[in-house]
Image (spheres, rainbow, N blue to C red):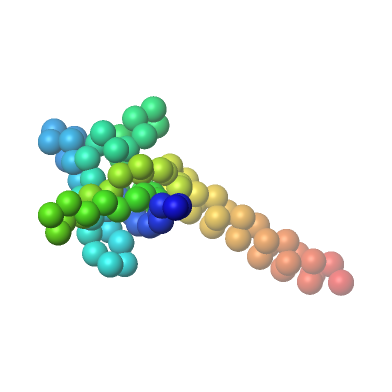
Amino acid sequence: MAQEFYQGKVKQYNPDKGFGFIATSEGDIFFHISDFPAEEGEPKRNEKVKFVALENDGKFKATQIERIDSNPAKTKKTKIANHNKSITTELLSNFRR
């Protein structure tokens, strides 16, 4: 049976305590740093992740967390630059006619 992955964004993370919360459309879900991929560094606010949710005594915990977008600010900047470039190219092609 395949496990169902959910998606969300890191809402907050407390490095001193080693836990945080992921914001999802269903609400916030707890995560512990031990369930985060350590080789890629600590979680960053608004970082997109996917995870498996486990229930324990009526509370949910995110496990098997994987990063979807490790640097959301850079990705957004790149998308904007590509969009601006396409608009500029289109405008210039109109002038060349």
| Front-most of residues 91 and 17 | 17
Q: Is residue 51 left or right of residue 59?
A: right
Q: Is residue 27 left or right of residue 39?
A: left
Q: Is residue 77 visible?
A: yes
* 46 shown above or below 87: above
Q: Is residue 21 visible?
A: no
Q: Position of residue 1 (x, y in %)?
A: 44, 52
* 97 shown above or below 29: below
* 86 shown above or below 12: below
* 97 shown above or below 45: below
- Please count the marks in the image: 0
| Front-most of residues 19 and 69 | 19
Give the residue at x 41% y 56%.
Answer: 4
| Front-most of residues 48 and 73 | 48
| Front-most of residues 78 and 37 | 37
Q: Is residue 18 left or right of residue 4?
A: left
Give the residue at x 27% y 58%.
Answer: 23
> Quadrant of the rendered structure where residue 15 is?
top left
Which quarter of the figure is the C terminus placed in?
bottom right
Q: Position of residue 88 (x, y in %)?
A: 68, 62
> Quadrant of the rendered structure where residue 36 is?
top left
